[in-house]
């Protein structure tokens, strides 16, 4: 009897070991995700914590409920690495955008010196691994990007945040010889580009919510052919110019979000991405009207409207929009990467464009 009991115990050992290993792996994932909250922020930044998003992703990962929506909603998780000590230039599968790394080959002393000021946006590895996210760049992996983008239409509609993100998007999805510099004597204008794989990208200058509402009108009908991806951004011009308070923005956002939901109901395959406002560095503001209007309190009020799940319903879960949290991404960036208090270096928008591309990738596989 003792021999039979011992045999049964030995037979169960592999199962016990396997269960223990699974439990430890799950706990490791939770602990890894729990450390994702970045502590470095700009002094006067409006920062939205990653904690809620991290917990949600951990729950979905552990319960096996991850879907394209879950991956897309957590694509903004990541952090900036700085200089050599911060491993900004260290090779990493999770680096989406970098600047200042220069050459890393033989006789690169001068470049390594400049790398002290280098920065890189690195997606949280647990999210990237789980969701299969990585850098999407036609200059490095042309055939893969062609396969992803073939025949797609993407539309960026909004203010300067959408325009700069569009610049990063077309740079990553255009042929090497293409002119992707958005340079023009007319600053506030529309743009159109042919991308790899016969895809097409457009930017529509629509700084007010009402402008974006009008720009989306052609896509609302049931027989319309809307773009596969629509990226929206609107708040900076409202915060700067709305003299009657935030009410104008609220009404404009109600109309815009209603149209977004109507388009999504009739064309559920369309991906909507919402960019909130960048973090404002008040010490770098020069214009008196911006100093007066771009206060932390005011910017938080406009951000709250965008996140409103009852009256506005633009972003998940009440709306179809996937939030790319430009406020947090820029708040984490080194302050010297802010150009004028509102806009940032190109590397920041390259990172945002890569996040958007991976969101699209999660739906277009």
Image: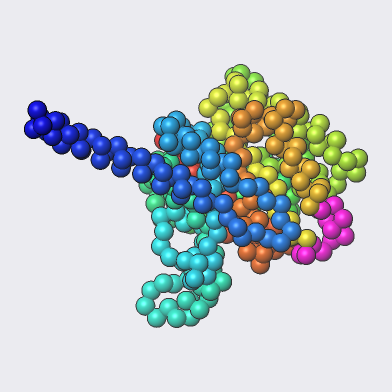
Q: Quadrant of residue 90?
A: bottom left
Query: Which residue reaches farthest right?
Result: 244
Q: How many marks?
A: 0
Q: Which residues are magenta?
A: 283-295
Observer-nearest of 21 and 344? 21
* Residue 6 on image: x %, y %: 13, 34
- Secondary structure that dominates the magenta span: helix
- The answer to if 289 sits in the magenta stretch is yes
* Residue 330 on image: x %, y %: 64, 55
Q: Residue at coordinates 87% horizontally, 55% vertically from top-left?
A: 292
In the displayed structure image, the side of residue 44 where residue 96 appears, left or right:
left
Q: Residue at coordinates 36% horizontally, 40% vertically from top-left?
A: 23
In the displayed structure image, the side of residue 33 where residue 166 appears, left or right:
right
| Scheme of colours in the image | rainbow
In the displayed structure image, the side of residue 295 where residue 118 appears, left or right:
left
Q: Residue at coordinates 79% horizontally, 52% vertically from top-left?
A: 296
| Residue 233 seen in the figure | yes
* Residue 145 on image: x %, y %: 42, 45
**Quadrant (top left/top right/bottom left/bottom right) for the C terminus:** top left
Q: Residue at coordinates 53% horizontally, 37% vertically from top-left?
A: 56
Decide: is 123 above or below 254: below
* Residue 359 on image: x %, y %: 51, 40
**Quadrant (top left/top right/bottom left/bottom right) for the N terminus:** top left
Decide: is 222 above or below 364: above
């Amino acid at each position: 009897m003792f021999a039979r009991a011992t045999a049964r115990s030995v037979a169960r050992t592999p199962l016990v070991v396997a269960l223990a290993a699974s439990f430890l792996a799950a706990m490791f994932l939770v602990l890894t995700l729990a450390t994702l909250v970045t502590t470095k922020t700009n002094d006067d930044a409006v920062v939205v914590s990653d904690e809620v998003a991290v917990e949600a992703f951990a729950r979905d990962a552990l319960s096996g409920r991850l879907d394209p929506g879950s991956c897309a909603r957590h694509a903004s998780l990541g952090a900036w690495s700085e200089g050599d000590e911060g491993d900004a230039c260290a090779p990493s599968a999770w680096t989406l955008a970098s600047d200042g790394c220069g050459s890393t080959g033989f006789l690169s002393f001068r470049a390594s010196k400049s790398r002290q000021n280098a920065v890189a946006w690195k997606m949280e590895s647990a999210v990237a691994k789980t969701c299969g996210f990585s850098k999407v760049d036609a200059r490095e992996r042309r055939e893969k990007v062609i396969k992803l983008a073939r025949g797609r239409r993407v539309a960026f509609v909004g203010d300067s945040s959408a325009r700069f993100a569009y610049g990063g998007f077309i740079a990553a999805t255009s042929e090497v010889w293409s002119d992707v510099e958005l340079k023009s004597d007319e600053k506030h204008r529309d743009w159109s580009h042919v991308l790899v794989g016969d895809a097409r990208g457009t930017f529509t200058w629509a700084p007010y919510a009402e402008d974006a509402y009008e720009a989306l009108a052609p896509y609302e009908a049931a027989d319309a052919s809307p773009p596969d991806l629509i990226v929206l951004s609107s708040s900076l011009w409202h915060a700067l110019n709305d003299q009657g308070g935030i009410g104008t923005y609220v009404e404009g956002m109600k109309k815009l979000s209603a149209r977004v939901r109507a388009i999504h109901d009739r064309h559920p395959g369309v991906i909507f991405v919402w960019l909130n406002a960048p973090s404002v560095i008040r010490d770098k503001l020069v214009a008196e009207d911006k100093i007066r209007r771009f206060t932390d309190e005011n910017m938080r009020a406009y951000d709250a409207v965008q996140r409103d799940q009852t009256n506005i319903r633009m972003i998940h879960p009440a709306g179809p929009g996937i939030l790319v949290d430009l406020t947090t991404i820029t708040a984490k960036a080194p302050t010297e990467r802010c150009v004028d208090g509102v806009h940032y270096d190109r590397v920041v928008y390259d990172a945002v464009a890569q996040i958007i591309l991976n969101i699209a990738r999660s739906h277009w596989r």
